Each structure stands twice: as C-alpha cells, then as structure tokens.
Amino acid sequence: MTERSILAAVSGIQANQTYLDSIGNNIANADTVGYKDSEVQFQDLLSQQLSGGAAPTTTAGGVNPVAVGSGVAVAANVVNLSEGSLEQTGIPSDVAIQGNGYLVVQTASGAQQYTRDGSLTVDANGDLTTQQGGLIMGWQANSAGTVNSNAPLTAIKIPQGETIGASATTTMTLSGNLPAYTSTTSPPAPQSTTINAYDSLGDAVPITVTFTPVGGTADEWTMSATVVDPSTGKAVYLVGTSATSGPTVTFDPSTGEVKSISGVTPGANGSFTVPVTMSNMPSAYTFPSGDTLSFLFPAPGSASQVTQYNAASTIQASQDGYPSGTLQSYSIGTDGTITGSFSNGATLPLGQIALADFANPGGLSDQGAGLYATSPNSGQAQIGTPGSGGRGTLLGGELEQSNVNLGNELTELITAQEAYTANTKVLTTTDQVVQALLNVP
C-alpha cells in the first residue's frame, strides 16, 4: 500500500521539522545568558503486523513475524542542564550560579518563576530585578545587618544612598609588638598609640593608650589610657590613674606572649579584657548609661596578639564602632549575601538572595525570557540559601553564558537536513509509483 509509505514520510518530515526548529532555536540563543541547549529525541510509531510468527516444529523451522512501521514521532525535547562558561562583567548586580539552582523571580502578575539568567539590575525603587522587571526574591536584612533566612521570601532592595546610623565603640583591640628589655638593660621609652573610638552619636573620641616599662623589672609594662576633655583641654585617665598607675601587663620571656594582666582574669581562650572607666569619660562625648568600653588583648598565639620581642614597637589598636555613613557600593557573596560598603568604612549585610532547586529540573516549563515555572514532573521548589541543601553558590560580577555548542549544532543541522530531504524523496518516489499504476492500460 502506497498510503503507508506516504504517511511514514509525512511523519518523518514533521518530526525533522521539529528537529530543525530545536536546532535553529539553539543556534539563535548561542549568546543568550543562562540559556540551556535542548535536543529532540525521536521514537518510532506503532508497526503494522503483516503476518504473525510461527514456532518451530519437528518438520519445519520457526518463522519471524513480519511488520512494517508507520513512521516516527518526537518523543521528547531534552534540555541539557550542564553549566555554561562563566564571564566576568565587573557589574556588581550581575550574578552567576555555580552548581544547581535557580534565582527566584516574582513576575508582575505575582507568579513565582525561576531563572538562571543573572543579568540583574537595580530599578528606581532600589529593587533588584531581572532585565524584564521581575523582582529577585530573598531575605532583607534588618537595620543591624541581620538576615533571617527562615522568614518568608521578600523582594530584595539595594537602596542607593541609604544611610546607616552611628554605632558606638564597645571594644578596642590591641595588636603589635612592644620592644623587649631585661633587668640589666635600660628600659625603652613609653610606647603609645592613639585610636579614634566613636560615641553613640558618631563623634570621634581620640583615646591614647600608653605602655610604660616597669623600671628595674624585665617583661613588665604598665598600661594607661587617656582622652582629652574638649572643655578643659586636659587629659583624663580612662585606664589607670596616672602613666605609671594602671594594670601591669606581664610577658612570658620564653615566648614573648602576654602571660598575665594584674586585676584581669583571662577569658576561656586566654584573651584579656581591660575595662575603661566610663565615669571618667568627658561629658562632651555621648555614651548612654549602660554602655561599656574595653581594651581587648587577643589570645596568645593568635595572629593579632600583643607580643614583646626584640624588635621595634608596632603597637596599634582597632575598634568596632563607626560614625553614620552612606551606601557607596555593594557586592554579592558566594552565599548570596549582599554586603554594602558605606562612606564611613563600615560594611553591613543588606540582604541575601535565595536559590530554588528541584527534584527534576528538566521537568520545568519554559516560559520564555529565561524564565521557568514548575510542572507536575519538576517537583516543588526547594528554596534556601546558596551553598546549602545541594544548592550551588553565587559568583557576583559574573554571568553564566549559554551552553550551546555551535560545532555540535551545525553537525546536527546537516543530519536534520539530510533526513528531511530523504523523507521528501520518499514522497516523490511514492508519487511516481502511483503514477505508474495509473498509467497501466
């Protein structure tokens, strides 16, 4: 029957047209950020049995069944989920996903969709969005920079020009070296360093800490700290009552590390905390009742410990307070945390981007514009922080490129073209056979 060959050829043309459509779409999206290559897979249609098989007998051999297929159909269009190459852009809002996962996007209709396209931007409202205006979801940090990833998802904001209030200093951490001396050598001169602490209004409080060697005794230094009262111009002692009347810091001569500080009990890790007498703080500085301020000597053996070696003095201090400041820039970390850098030198988390993973990502429904929606075979979105629960990590300032291999696509294009042409040949040959039958006298 010529009808069978015609139907088979038509199914082949239709299937290979879908094949060409897929290849053309892959080639067209070779430069689309986050695009995933897809490949058409075929399956044969139900065969028509012309004769059944027969079992062998004592006098004759077995006979195989005779069947002729009725064509081909598209079985699936399989998405290649392998990662595309990464490209650095230097744009802080760009983000690439390294590993499994999709950014969570809230569309204008309120629907929740997902994307691997990390070419993001910040709109006029400070919202972090896709290029099509979809809101990137995650968790916003509170005023203290704390992110609660157990809270419901919300649109991430990076408000340009945002200000943070001042934070009063609570701890001044000492580090560096004091020059070693012995009981038989002349002690070195007192060693001082000045640091700007900050009160609750963000006013700088210049505090000078001084270490004075104990004359005639090796490895011991008296610690004092002063601040100048702006109203009188005189120094007020915050640690000790004079340059030589304060806690004594004793060093271990064999290691050069802090051994003890008089009047101070070491912490569990061996560090020492020397309190500041807040009642002596000049009234020009605003430290509300209950505020505390102290000097921290890091644990012996730590990288930033205070030492006494036979070397020049490098004693210095850092502190944890800051004045008010304005957001200058931001960056996205591997765990999705967006960290803002402020004009006062402080850094503070602004929020954290969420990632969604699926039991079967290949089952997601392509919505166009790089967006996907869940389907009955994708499973529900498992949303959490990047780097947890099998989800990948984020790379700020980078983009994941399309994973289309143009060499493979051009090869597939030739295969599809040849198959399409061959199926049309079946049609023309069948037509010639039919014409020959019609011309029989």
Image (cartoon, rainbow, N blue to C red):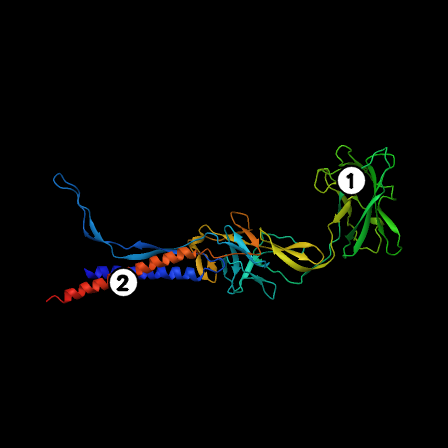
Residue designated by label 2: 424
The residue most toward the left is 441
Q: Position of residue 358 (x, y in %)?
A: 47, 51
In the picture, the disc for residue 311 is: 1
Badge 2: how crowded within 10 Å, few (<14), some, or many (20+)? some
Q: Is residue 171 visible?
A: no
Q: Between 73 and 310, which is closer to the camera in this rendering? A: 310
Nearest-to-viewer mark from 2 and 1: 1
Q: Is residue 113 left or right of residue 285?
A: left
Which kind of residue does numbered mark 2 sit on?
Answer: Thr
Residue 223 in which image quadrant: top right
Which kind of residue does numbered mark 1 sit on?
Answer: Ala
In the picture, the disc for residue 432 is: none
The N terminus sits in image quarter: bottom left
Label 2, secondary structure: give it. helix
Label 1, secondary structure: give it. loop
Q: Position of residue 220 (x, y in %)?
A: 82, 36
Q: Position of residue 87 (x, y in %)?
A: 53, 56
The C terminus sits in image quarter: bottom left
Q: Is residue 210 above or below residue 24?
A: above
Badge 1: how crowded within 10 Å, few (<14), some, or many (20+)? few
Q: Residue at x 21, y 65 (%)?
A: 431
- Number of callouts in the render? 2
